[in-house]
């Protein structure tokens, strides 16, 4: 075992003993800096071990397993240790005891970093980067992705799960929706042509954290305080954020807008690690909801389009509720979304048609499903009981250029 110091910036939080395969064997917190520790379950005796394992890149992500084997690493936690636990979303890292390393020497917000996961074969090599660290060891999610620096801008390249480019297209559709709504707090995704993969397009988004603001997930916020049995996870999350300085009248409208736009796009992956807030580096105060991100698992991707309203309204979700209809029941202000300002079907058709692997019949099915969701949302917004309505609609075809969707 080797001893390390867990730090936030240059503040020491705990001393860790880490095994050869990268797991925390034991640790001791420094009481004077306990308030700087990652948010965690109160009264838990092994929360730091769990946090460290969650921080490591999932073995199911993209081609991580093969990459670890090629590098001779013993697992995701070993990969995380080799890169000092560094991330581009927060300021936590580990320093070998007596190494003398400081945040300025290793942080990847300001230093160059090594991109050892090349999704696009056209991405430049970075063999001489100093320090030789990468933030990919702490990158979450199962979709193939990597951090990179393009034209001096730090950001993320996301790929897809199969030969289709659908998830990357869906990020662009979500970007278009928020743009049309005039909503400002979202992540902009632009298409990238990908070479060397079964799919043809990925997408790129710029980093929205910085040396001034870090990311805290709704999951970590949710578990950081014990929830009363008479309050649901949604209201508990809003309440805990309020205690950290984020007003309810700012957070609630954001969440309601997100719920409604996810419904329109049939987004079903808004789990509590895909919802976050930004926290001030110095004061630890929650500043604002993090920009909406990770909307690729939407538009019926990797799934059939429900052929009736009953099933359409029961699309399961990983979020504050188990399906879309239950999520809509959390919304108090139905007018936060303008249903007249959404991506039209020609834009969506032209986008999907860029993919030679996507059939016309699949595109038609997705568009019909999207039109049905728009109709259901419109009726719900007017106060109708959409569980009881009989579905009818007229397909529309409004010309719309794709515009500037490429990075």
Image: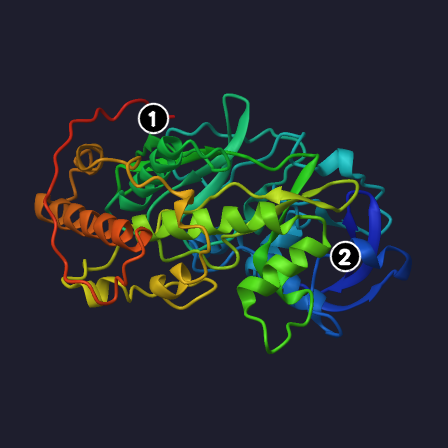
- Residue 75 found in image quarter: bottom right
Q: In the image, which disc is placed on residue 37?
A: 2
Could you say which is closer to the camera, residue 197 or residue 184?
184
Above or below residue 406? Residue 290 is below
- Provide the secondary structure element on which disc 2 rests: loop
Q: How far apart are marks 2 and 1 (CA)?
A: 39 Å
Towards the viewer: 353 or 260: 260
Quarter of the rendering occupied by the N terminus: bottom right
Q: In which quarter of the image is the C terminus?
A: top left
Residue 379 picture location, percent across and down: 25, 53
Q: Is residue 54 left or right of residue 407?
A: right
> Outermost residue, front direction?
383
Q: Which colour scheme is used?
A: rainbow
Viewed as shown, does residue 98 lie left or right of 229? right
* Residue 308 higher or lower than 209, as above or below: below
Q: Is residue 401 above or below residue 73?
A: above
Q: Which mark is residue 122?
A: none
As helix, strand or loop, the secondary structure at mark 1 comes to: loop
Residue 77 in view (yes/no): no
Q: Residue at position x 36%, y 58% from top?
A: 268
- Give the quarter of the image for residue 326: bottom left
Residue with the mark numbered 1: 406
Rendered location of residue 342, percent (x, y): 29, 37
Residue closest to the far bottom: 229
């Amino acid at each position: 075992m080797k001893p390390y110091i867990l730090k936030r910036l240059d503040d020491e939080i705990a001393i860790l003993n880490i095994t050869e395969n990268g797991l925390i064997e034991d640790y001791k917190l420094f009481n004077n800096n306990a308030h700087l520790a990652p948010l965690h379950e109160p009264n838990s005796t092994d929360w730091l071990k769990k946090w460290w394992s969650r921080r490591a890149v999932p073995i199911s992500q993209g081609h991580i397993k093969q990459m670890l084997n090629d590098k001779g690493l013993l697992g995701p936690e070993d990969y995380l240790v080799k890169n000092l636990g560094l991330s581009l979303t927060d300021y936590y890292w580990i320093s070998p005891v007596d190494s003398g390393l400081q945040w300025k020497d290793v942080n990847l917000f300001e230093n160059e970093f090594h991109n050892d996961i090349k999704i696009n074969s056209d991405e430049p090599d970075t063999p001489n980067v100093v320090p030789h660290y990468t933030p990919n060891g702490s990158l979450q999610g199962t979709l193939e992705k990597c951090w990179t620096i393009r034209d001096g801008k730090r950001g993320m390249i996301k790929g897809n799960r199969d030969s289709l480019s659908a998830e990357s297209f869906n990020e662009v559709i979500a970007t278009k929706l928020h743009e049309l709504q005039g909503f400002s707090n979202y992540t902009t995704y632009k298409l990238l042509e990908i070479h060397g993969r079964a799919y043809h397009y990925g997408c790129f988004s710029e980093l929205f954290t910085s040396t001034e603001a870090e990311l805290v997930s709704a999951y970590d916020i949710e578990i950081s305080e014990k929830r009363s049995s008479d309050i649901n996870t949604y209201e508990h999350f809003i309440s805990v954020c309020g205690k950290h300085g984020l007003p309810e009248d700012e957070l609630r409208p954001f969440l309601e807008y997100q719920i409604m736009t996810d419904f329109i796009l049939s987004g079903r992956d808004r789990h509590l690690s895909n919802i976050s807030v930004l926290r001030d580096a110095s004061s630890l105060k929650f500043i604002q909801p993090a920009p909406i991100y990770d909307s690729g698992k939407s538009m019926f991707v990797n799934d059939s389009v429900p052929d009736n309203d009953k099933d359409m309204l029961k699309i399961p979700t990983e979020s504050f509720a188990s399906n879309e209809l239950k999520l809509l029941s959390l919304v108090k202000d139905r007018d936060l979304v303008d249903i007249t300002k959404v991506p039209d079907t020609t834009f969506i058709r032209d986008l999907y048609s860029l993919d030679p692997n996507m059939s016309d019949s699949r595109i038609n099915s997705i568009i019909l499903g999207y039109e049905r969701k728009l109709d259901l949302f419109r009726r719900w917004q007017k106060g109708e009981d959409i569980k009881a309505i009989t579905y009818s609609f007229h397909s529309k075809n409004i010309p719309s250029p794709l515009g500037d969707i490429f990075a």
